[in-house]
Protein backbone atom coordinates (compact mmCIF):
# COMPACT_ATOMS: atom_id res chain seq x y z
CA UNK A 1 0.00 0.00 0.00
CA UNK A 2 1.61 3.26 -1.09
CA UNK A 3 -0.34 5.40 1.38
CA UNK A 4 2.08 4.49 4.19
CA UNK A 5 4.90 6.58 2.71
CA UNK A 6 2.86 9.71 3.33
CA UNK A 7 2.96 9.23 7.11
CA UNK A 8 5.67 11.65 8.18
CA UNK A 9 7.29 10.63 11.49
CA UNK A 10 9.47 12.62 13.86
CA UNK A 11 13.13 11.81 13.02
CA UNK A 12 13.89 11.43 16.74
CA UNK A 13 11.70 8.31 16.93
CA UNK A 14 12.28 6.96 13.42
CA UNK A 15 14.66 4.15 14.46
CA UNK A 16 11.92 2.78 16.74
CA UNK A 17 9.79 2.01 13.67
CA UNK A 18 12.02 -1.04 13.18
CA UNK A 19 12.37 -2.02 16.85
CA UNK A 20 11.05 -5.55 17.39
CA UNK A 21 11.95 -6.21 21.02
CA UNK A 22 9.29 -7.67 23.30
CA UNK A 23 8.98 -4.44 25.31
CA UNK A 24 9.21 -0.92 23.91
CA UNK A 25 9.12 1.79 26.59
CA UNK A 26 8.54 5.43 25.57
CA UNK A 27 8.58 7.77 28.55
CA UNK A 28 9.42 11.38 29.28
CA UNK A 29 7.94 14.85 29.43
CA UNK A 30 4.76 16.37 28.08
CA UNK A 31 4.54 17.35 24.41
CA UNK A 32 7.36 15.08 23.24
CA UNK A 33 5.17 13.41 20.61
CA UNK A 34 5.67 9.87 21.93
CA UNK A 35 1.98 8.89 21.76
CA UNK A 36 1.61 10.38 18.27
CA UNK A 37 4.62 8.38 17.08
CA UNK A 38 3.32 5.13 18.59
CA UNK A 39 0.01 5.56 16.75
CA UNK A 40 1.99 6.13 13.53
CA UNK A 41 4.11 3.01 14.13
CA UNK A 42 0.99 0.90 14.67
CA UNK A 43 -0.71 2.28 11.55
CA UNK A 44 2.38 1.62 9.42
CA UNK A 45 2.60 -1.96 10.72
CA UNK A 46 -1.07 -2.54 9.91
CA UNK A 47 -0.64 -1.09 6.42
CA UNK A 48 2.39 -3.26 5.66
CA UNK A 49 1.21 -6.58 7.13
CA UNK A 50 -1.93 -8.22 8.43
CA UNK A 51 -1.86 -7.30 12.11
CA UNK A 52 -4.29 -7.37 15.04
CA UNK A 53 -3.16 -4.79 17.57
CA UNK A 54 -4.79 -4.00 20.91
CA UNK A 55 -4.60 -0.49 22.39
CA UNK A 56 -5.46 -0.06 26.08
CA UNK A 57 -5.96 2.46 28.82
CA UNK A 58 -7.03 1.97 32.40
CA UNK A 59 -10.69 2.77 31.71
CA UNK A 60 -12.87 2.30 28.63
CA UNK A 61 -14.30 5.79 29.16
CA UNK A 62 -10.89 7.38 28.49
CA UNK A 63 -10.45 5.71 25.08
CA UNK A 64 -12.70 8.00 22.99
CA UNK A 65 -10.87 11.28 23.57
CA UNK A 66 -7.37 9.86 23.64
CA UNK A 67 -6.35 6.75 21.68
CA UNK A 68 -9.34 6.71 19.31
CA UNK A 69 -9.11 10.43 18.55
CA UNK A 70 -5.37 10.17 17.94
CA UNK A 71 -5.76 7.40 15.36
CA UNK A 72 -8.75 9.18 13.79
CA UNK A 73 -6.77 12.41 13.39
CA UNK A 74 -3.75 10.68 11.81
CA UNK A 75 -5.90 8.60 9.45
CA UNK A 76 -7.88 11.61 8.20
CA UNK A 77 -4.79 13.85 7.97
CA UNK A 78 -3.08 11.26 5.78
CA UNK A 79 -6.20 10.62 3.67
CA UNK A 80 -6.35 6.94 4.61
CA UNK A 81 -10.12 6.67 5.11
CA UNK A 82 -10.47 4.89 1.76
CA UNK A 83 -8.53 1.88 3.04
CA UNK A 84 -9.30 2.06 6.78
CA UNK A 85 -12.84 1.67 8.09
CA UNK A 86 -13.47 3.65 11.29
CA UNK A 87 -16.00 2.18 13.74
CA UNK A 88 -17.20 4.92 16.09
CA UNK A 89 -19.32 2.59 18.19
CA UNK A 90 -16.60 0.26 19.48
CA UNK A 91 -13.66 2.59 18.62
CA UNK A 92 -11.95 0.12 16.30
CA UNK A 93 -10.27 0.36 12.88
CA UNK A 94 -10.37 -2.24 10.09
CA UNK A 95 -7.99 -2.21 7.11
CA UNK A 96 -8.70 -3.52 3.63
CA UNK A 97 -5.79 -5.97 4.00
CA UNK A 98 -7.47 -7.55 7.04
CA UNK A 99 -5.53 -5.71 9.75
CA UNK A 100 -7.38 -4.49 12.85
CA UNK A 101 -6.73 -1.98 15.62
CA UNK A 102 -8.88 -2.72 18.67
CA UNK A 103 -9.26 -0.57 21.78
CA UNK A 104 -10.34 -1.44 25.31
CA UNK A 105 -10.24 -0.24 28.87
CA UNK A 106 -8.66 -2.56 31.41
CA UNK A 107 -11.78 -2.13 33.57
CA UNK A 108 -13.72 -4.10 30.93
CA UNK A 109 -12.54 -7.58 31.93
CA UNK A 110 -15.10 -9.52 29.88
CA UNK A 111 -14.18 -7.71 26.67
CA UNK A 112 -10.52 -8.40 27.33
CA UNK A 113 -11.21 -12.13 27.72
CA UNK A 114 -12.89 -12.24 24.31
CA UNK A 115 -9.93 -10.73 22.42
CA UNK A 116 -7.66 -13.33 20.81
CA UNK A 117 -4.84 -13.62 18.28
CA UNK A 118 -3.26 -10.27 19.15
CA UNK A 119 0.10 -9.51 17.53
CA UNK A 120 1.02 -6.49 19.67
CA UNK A 121 -0.35 -4.31 22.51
CA UNK A 122 -0.06 -0.60 23.29
CA UNK A 123 -0.70 0.54 26.89
CA UNK A 124 -1.15 4.33 26.94
CA UNK A 125 -0.71 6.21 30.26
CA UNK A 126 0.80 3.02 31.67
CA UNK A 127 1.33 4.59 35.12
CA UNK A 128 -2.46 4.33 35.62
CA UNK A 129 -2.32 0.55 35.20
CA UNK A 130 -1.68 -1.99 37.96
CA UNK A 131 1.19 -4.44 37.55
CA UNK A 132 -1.23 -7.37 37.77
CA UNK A 133 -3.15 -6.01 34.74
CA UNK A 134 0.07 -5.66 32.79
CA UNK A 135 1.07 -9.21 33.69
CA UNK A 136 -2.23 -10.55 32.35
CA UNK A 137 -1.74 -8.69 29.06
CA UNK A 138 1.83 -9.96 28.83
CA UNK A 139 0.62 -13.54 29.29
CA UNK A 140 -2.01 -13.12 26.57
CA UNK A 141 0.55 -12.04 24.00
CA UNK A 142 1.66 -15.52 22.98
CA UNK A 143 1.47 -18.06 20.16
CA UNK A 144 2.65 -18.06 16.56
CA UNK A 145 2.37 -14.86 14.55
CA UNK A 146 3.30 -13.69 11.05
CA UNK A 147 5.14 -10.71 12.56
CA UNK A 148 6.84 -9.86 15.83
CA UNK A 149 4.99 -9.52 19.14
CA UNK A 150 5.55 -6.35 21.14
CA UNK A 151 4.11 -4.51 24.13
CA UNK A 152 4.50 -0.73 23.91
CA UNK A 153 4.16 1.32 27.09
CA UNK A 154 3.97 5.12 27.08
CA UNK A 155 3.82 7.41 30.11
CA UNK A 156 5.08 10.44 32.01
CA UNK A 157 7.34 9.25 34.88
CA UNK A 158 5.15 10.61 37.67
CA UNK A 159 6.18 8.26 40.49
CA UNK A 160 9.71 7.01 41.13
CA UNK A 161 8.30 4.24 43.36
CA UNK A 162 6.06 2.93 40.56
CA UNK A 163 6.24 -0.73 39.54
CA UNK A 164 7.18 0.39 36.00
CA UNK A 165 10.47 1.83 37.25
CA UNK A 166 11.27 -1.28 39.23
CA UNK A 167 10.35 -3.65 36.38
CA UNK A 168 11.80 -1.88 33.34
CA UNK A 169 14.48 0.49 34.68
CA UNK A 170 15.93 -0.95 37.89
CA UNK A 171 15.64 -4.52 36.54
CA UNK A 172 15.55 -3.99 32.79
CA UNK A 173 14.59 -7.13 30.80
CA UNK A 174 16.98 -8.28 28.10
CA UNK A 175 14.41 -7.86 25.30
CA UNK A 176 13.54 -4.25 26.09
CA UNK A 177 14.13 -0.86 24.46
CA UNK A 178 13.73 2.27 26.58
CA UNK A 179 13.37 5.68 24.92
CA UNK A 180 13.36 8.99 26.79
CA UNK A 181 12.00 12.17 25.20
CA UNK A 182 10.95 15.72 26.06
CA UNK A 183 9.27 18.52 24.10
CA UNK A 184 12.73 19.49 22.87
CA UNK A 185 12.76 16.28 20.79
CA UNK A 186 9.49 17.16 19.05
CA UNK A 187 10.22 19.07 15.84
CA UNK A 188 6.49 19.58 15.24
CA UNK A 189 5.71 21.34 18.53
CA UNK A 190 4.78 25.01 18.42
CA UNK A 191 6.43 27.81 20.39
CA UNK A 192 3.17 28.67 22.15
CA UNK A 193 3.01 25.18 23.73
CA UNK A 194 6.63 25.45 24.89
CA UNK A 195 5.84 28.79 26.49
CA UNK A 196 2.75 27.36 28.19
CA UNK A 197 4.77 24.47 29.65
CA UNK A 198 7.36 26.76 31.15
CA UNK A 199 4.79 29.24 32.50
CA UNK A 200 2.33 26.71 33.91
CA UNK A 201 4.75 24.07 35.18
CA UNK A 202 8.25 25.56 35.35
CA UNK A 203 7.73 27.18 38.76
CA UNK A 204 7.04 23.80 40.45
CA UNK A 205 10.27 21.80 40.85
CA UNK A 206 8.53 18.42 40.99
CA UNK A 207 6.25 19.11 38.02
CA UNK A 208 9.25 20.47 36.12
CA UNK A 209 11.10 17.20 36.75
CA UNK A 210 8.21 15.15 35.38
CA UNK A 211 6.62 17.15 32.57
CA UNK A 212 9.47 19.32 31.26
CA UNK A 213 12.60 17.26 31.97
CA UNK A 214 10.77 13.93 31.75
CA UNK A 215 12.53 12.65 34.90
CA UNK A 216 11.09 10.39 37.57
CA UNK A 217 9.22 12.40 40.18
CA UNK A 218 6.08 12.42 42.23
CA UNK A 219 2.97 14.54 41.61
CA UNK A 220 1.92 16.47 44.70
CA UNK A 221 -1.82 16.78 45.12
CA UNK A 222 -1.94 18.83 48.33
CA UNK A 223 -2.32 17.72 51.94
CA UNK A 224 1.20 16.25 52.18
CA UNK A 225 2.27 15.56 55.78
CA UNK A 226 5.82 16.70 54.96
CA UNK A 227 4.67 19.81 53.17
CA UNK A 228 8.13 21.44 53.16
CA UNK A 229 10.01 18.53 51.63
CA UNK A 230 11.54 19.44 48.26
CA UNK A 231 13.33 16.81 46.20
CA UNK A 232 15.79 19.27 44.67
CA UNK A 233 16.67 20.73 48.07
CA UNK A 234 16.82 17.62 50.25
CA UNK A 235 17.93 14.74 47.99
CA UNK A 236 21.54 14.32 46.93
CA UNK A 237 23.90 11.75 45.42
CA UNK A 238 26.65 13.01 47.74
CA UNK A 239 25.36 11.65 51.04
CA UNK A 240 27.25 8.47 51.91
CA UNK A 241 28.84 6.97 55.03
CA UNK A 242 31.61 9.12 56.54
CA UNK A 243 34.40 7.41 58.50
CA UNK A 244 34.73 7.95 62.25
CA UNK A 245 31.31 9.56 62.67
CA UNK A 246 28.76 7.57 64.73
CA UNK A 247 25.84 5.87 63.01
CA UNK A 248 22.31 6.44 64.30
CA UNK A 249 19.91 3.57 63.53
CA UNK A 250 16.18 4.22 63.81
CA UNK A 251 13.59 1.43 63.65
CA UNK A 252 9.96 1.08 62.70
CA UNK A 253 8.72 -2.36 63.72
CA UNK A 254 5.71 -2.71 61.40
CA UNK A 255 6.22 -5.95 59.48
CA UNK A 256 3.85 -5.39 56.55
CA UNK A 257 4.78 -4.73 53.81
CA UNK A 258 8.27 -4.71 55.39
CA UNK A 259 10.16 -4.04 58.62
CA UNK A 260 12.28 -0.89 58.55
CA UNK A 261 15.55 0.60 59.76
CA UNK A 262 17.00 3.91 58.56
CA UNK A 263 20.62 4.97 59.14
CA UNK A 264 21.73 8.54 59.82
CA UNK A 265 24.91 10.44 60.64
CA UNK A 266 25.13 13.87 62.27
CA UNK A 267 28.13 15.60 60.75
CA UNK A 268 28.63 18.11 63.56
CA UNK A 269 28.21 21.79 63.05
CA UNK A 270 29.08 23.53 59.82
CA UNK A 271 28.73 27.32 59.89
CA UNK A 272 26.58 27.03 63.02
CA UNK A 273 24.38 24.39 61.39
CA UNK A 274 24.03 20.65 62.07
CA UNK A 275 24.29 18.53 58.91
CA UNK A 276 22.14 15.40 59.16
CA UNK A 277 22.72 12.76 56.49
CA UNK A 278 20.24 9.97 55.84
CA UNK A 279 22.75 7.47 54.42
CA UNK A 280 20.85 4.19 54.07
CA UNK A 281 17.57 2.34 54.50
CA UNK A 282 16.77 -1.33 55.14
CA UNK A 283 13.24 -2.52 54.30
CA UNK A 284 12.88 -6.31 54.62
CA UNK A 285 9.76 -8.11 53.49
CA UNK A 286 8.58 -11.64 54.24
CA UNK A 287 10.22 -13.99 55.28
CA UNK A 288 12.91 -11.63 56.62
CA UNK A 289 10.54 -9.06 58.13
CA UNK A 290 11.67 -9.56 61.71
CA UNK A 291 13.96 -7.58 64.00
CA UNK A 292 16.73 -10.19 64.18
CA UNK A 293 17.02 -10.47 60.37
CA UNK A 294 16.97 -6.68 60.10
CA UNK A 295 19.87 -6.28 62.55
CA UNK A 296 21.79 -9.04 60.81
CA UNK A 297 21.49 -7.26 57.44
CA UNK A 298 22.76 -4.00 58.94
CA UNK A 299 25.71 -5.78 60.57
CA UNK A 300 26.57 -7.59 57.32
CA UNK A 301 26.87 -4.28 55.49
CA UNK A 302 28.42 -2.01 58.14
CA UNK A 303 30.04 -4.33 60.73
CA UNK A 304 32.82 -2.50 62.64
CA UNK A 305 31.58 0.88 61.40
CA UNK A 306 28.71 0.42 63.85
CA UNK A 307 30.98 0.86 66.90
CA UNK A 308 29.46 3.37 69.31
CA UNK A 309 26.11 3.46 67.48
CA UNK A 310 22.91 5.02 68.79
CA UNK A 311 19.51 3.45 68.21
CA UNK A 312 16.00 4.88 68.17
CA UNK A 313 12.52 3.73 67.27
CA UNK A 314 8.88 3.17 68.00
CA UNK A 315 8.26 3.10 71.76
CA UNK A 316 5.72 0.28 71.33
CA UNK A 317 8.64 -1.99 70.40
CA UNK A 318 9.38 -2.25 74.14
CA UNK A 319 6.36 -4.54 74.53
CA UNK A 320 6.60 -8.29 74.10
CA UNK A 321 4.46 -9.69 71.32
CA UNK A 322 3.55 -12.99 69.71
CA UNK A 323 6.54 -12.88 67.34
CA UNK A 324 9.13 -13.54 70.06
CA UNK A 325 9.70 -14.04 73.79
CA UNK A 326 11.89 -10.94 73.63
CA UNK A 327 10.73 -7.46 72.81
CA UNK A 328 12.18 -5.70 69.77
CA UNK A 329 14.74 -3.70 71.69
CA UNK A 330 15.98 -6.70 73.68
CA UNK A 331 16.65 -8.34 70.31
CA UNK A 332 18.40 -5.18 69.07
CA UNK A 333 20.60 -5.03 72.18
CA UNK A 334 21.48 -8.72 71.82
CA UNK A 335 22.31 -8.41 68.11
CA UNK A 336 24.24 -5.13 68.50
CA UNK A 337 25.89 -6.06 71.81
CA UNK A 338 29.49 -5.54 70.59
CA UNK A 339 28.70 -2.11 69.14
CA UNK A 340 26.60 -0.39 71.81
CA UNK A 341 27.48 1.53 74.98
CA UNK A 342 25.46 2.52 78.03
CA UNK A 343 24.27 5.67 76.26
CA UNK A 344 23.31 3.99 72.96
CA UNK A 345 19.62 3.46 73.75
CA UNK A 346 17.64 6.54 72.69
CA UNK A 347 14.19 5.01 72.41
CA UNK A 348 11.60 7.21 74.18
CA UNK A 349 9.06 5.75 76.63
CA UNK A 350 6.27 7.23 74.54
CA UNK A 351 6.19 8.36 70.94
CA UNK A 352 6.18 12.11 70.22
CA UNK A 353 2.69 13.45 69.34
CA UNK A 354 2.11 13.24 65.60
CA UNK A 355 0.84 16.77 65.02
CA UNK A 356 3.71 18.24 67.05
CA UNK A 357 6.36 16.21 65.26
CA UNK A 358 4.78 17.15 61.90
CA UNK A 359 5.35 20.82 62.65
CA UNK A 360 8.84 20.14 63.99
CA UNK A 361 10.02 18.08 60.99
CA UNK A 362 8.58 20.61 58.54
CA UNK A 363 10.46 23.40 60.32
CA UNK A 364 13.65 21.36 59.96
CA UNK A 365 12.92 20.84 56.25
CA UNK A 366 12.34 24.58 55.91
CA UNK A 367 15.64 25.21 57.82
CA UNK A 368 13.94 27.22 60.54
CA UNK A 369 16.29 25.46 62.98
CA UNK A 370 20.08 25.23 62.48
CA UNK A 371 19.60 21.70 61.13
CA UNK A 372 20.09 20.72 57.50
CA UNK A 373 18.84 17.27 56.47
CA UNK A 374 20.07 15.50 53.34
CA UNK A 375 18.64 12.25 51.92
CA UNK A 376 20.76 9.82 49.92
CA UNK A 377 19.18 9.46 46.47
CA UNK A 378 19.30 5.66 46.88
CA UNK A 379 16.91 5.81 49.85
CA UNK A 380 13.91 5.36 47.54
CA UNK A 381 11.33 4.41 50.16
CA UNK A 382 12.28 7.31 52.41
CA UNK A 383 11.93 9.73 49.50
CA UNK A 384 8.58 8.16 48.56
CA UNK A 385 7.34 8.64 52.13
CA UNK A 386 8.36 12.28 52.23
CA UNK A 387 6.57 12.89 48.93
CA UNK A 388 3.50 10.70 49.39
CA UNK A 389 2.40 10.55 53.04
CA UNK A 390 -0.79 12.58 53.48
CA UNK A 391 -2.06 14.56 56.44
CA UNK A 392 -5.30 13.41 58.06
CA UNK A 393 -8.02 15.85 59.12
CA UNK A 394 -6.76 15.85 62.73
CA UNK A 395 -3.19 16.73 61.72
CA UNK A 396 -1.85 13.19 62.08
CA UNK A 397 -0.60 10.91 59.31
CA UNK A 398 -3.34 9.53 57.09
CA UNK A 399 -3.09 5.75 57.35
CA UNK A 400 -4.11 4.73 53.83
CA UNK A 401 -4.58 0.98 53.51
CA UNK A 402 -3.78 -1.00 50.40
CA UNK A 403 -4.68 -4.62 49.78
CA UNK A 404 -2.35 -7.27 48.42
CA UNK A 405 -4.35 -8.99 45.67
CA UNK A 406 -2.52 -12.29 46.11
CA UNK A 407 -2.61 -12.61 49.91
CA UNK A 408 -5.66 -10.45 50.67
CA UNK A 409 -3.59 -8.74 53.39
CA UNK A 410 -4.08 -5.02 54.05
CA UNK A 411 -1.03 -2.85 54.67
CA UNK A 412 0.12 0.75 54.86
CA UNK A 413 2.19 1.42 51.73
CA UNK A 414 3.82 4.61 53.01
CA UNK A 415 4.98 6.03 56.33
CA UNK A 416 7.41 3.46 57.74
CA UNK A 417 10.75 5.07 56.82
CA UNK A 418 9.48 8.53 57.66
CA UNK A 419 8.25 7.31 61.07
CA UNK A 420 11.80 6.06 61.75
CA UNK A 421 13.14 9.46 60.71
CA UNK A 422 10.67 11.22 63.02
CA UNK A 423 11.76 9.18 66.05
CA UNK A 424 15.41 9.93 65.31
CA UNK A 425 15.03 13.69 64.74
CA UNK A 426 12.69 14.32 67.68
CA UNK A 427 15.03 12.52 70.09
CA UNK A 428 18.39 13.69 68.67
CA UNK A 429 17.28 17.33 68.71
CA UNK A 430 14.97 17.08 71.71
CA UNK A 431 16.05 20.50 72.97
CA UNK A 432 14.49 22.08 69.87
CA UNK A 433 11.53 19.69 69.80
CA UNK A 434 10.51 20.30 73.43
CA UNK A 435 10.70 24.05 72.99
Image: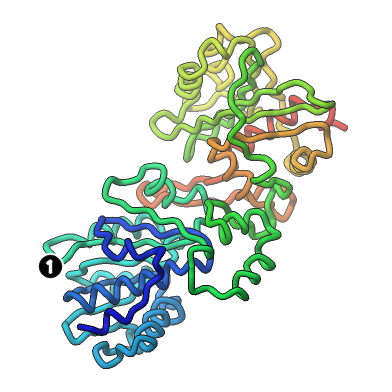
The N terminus lies in which quarter of the figure? bottom left
Q: Which residue occupies 63% across, 35% down?
A: 375
Q: Which residue occupies 44% across, 49% down?
A: 165
Mark 1 secondary-structure assignment: loop
Q: Which residue occupies 56% across, 52% down?
A: 217
**Is 294 situated left or right of 40 in this image?**
right
**Is 281 situated left or right of 223 in this image?**
left
Q: Position of residue 38 (x, y in %)?
A: 36, 69
Using a 10 Å C-alpha cutoff, classify the residue at mark 1 as few (fewer than 14 neighbours), some (14 to 19) or many (20 or more).
Answer: few
**Is 394 situated left or right of 388 in this image?**
right
Q: In this view, does 377 lie above or below 13?
A: above
Q: Which residue occupies 40% across, 56% down?
A: 179
Quarter assignment of residue 234: top right
Q: In this view, does 344 lie above or below 258?
A: above
Label 1 sits on residue: 146
The C terminus lies in which quarter of the figure? top right
Q: Where is residue 149 in the image (x, y as percent from the top left)?
A: 21, 62
Q: Where is residue 18 in the image (x, y as percent from the top left)?
A: 26, 63
Q: In this view, does 30 lie above or below 293?
A: below
How does the figure colour the protein chain or chains? Answer: rainbow
Amino acid sequence: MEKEIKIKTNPFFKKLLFDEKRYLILYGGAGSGKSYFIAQKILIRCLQNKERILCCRKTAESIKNSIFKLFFDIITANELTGIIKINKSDYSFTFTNGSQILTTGLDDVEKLKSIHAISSIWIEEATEVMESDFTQLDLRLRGESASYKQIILSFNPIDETHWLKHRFFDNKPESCTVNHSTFLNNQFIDEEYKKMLNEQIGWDVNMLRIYINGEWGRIQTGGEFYSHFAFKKHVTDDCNYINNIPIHVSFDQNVSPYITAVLFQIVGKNQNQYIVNCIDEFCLSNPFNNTESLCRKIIEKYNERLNGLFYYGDASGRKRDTRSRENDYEIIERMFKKYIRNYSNRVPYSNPPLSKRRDFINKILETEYPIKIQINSQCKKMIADLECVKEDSDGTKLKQLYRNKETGQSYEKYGHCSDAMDYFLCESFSNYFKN
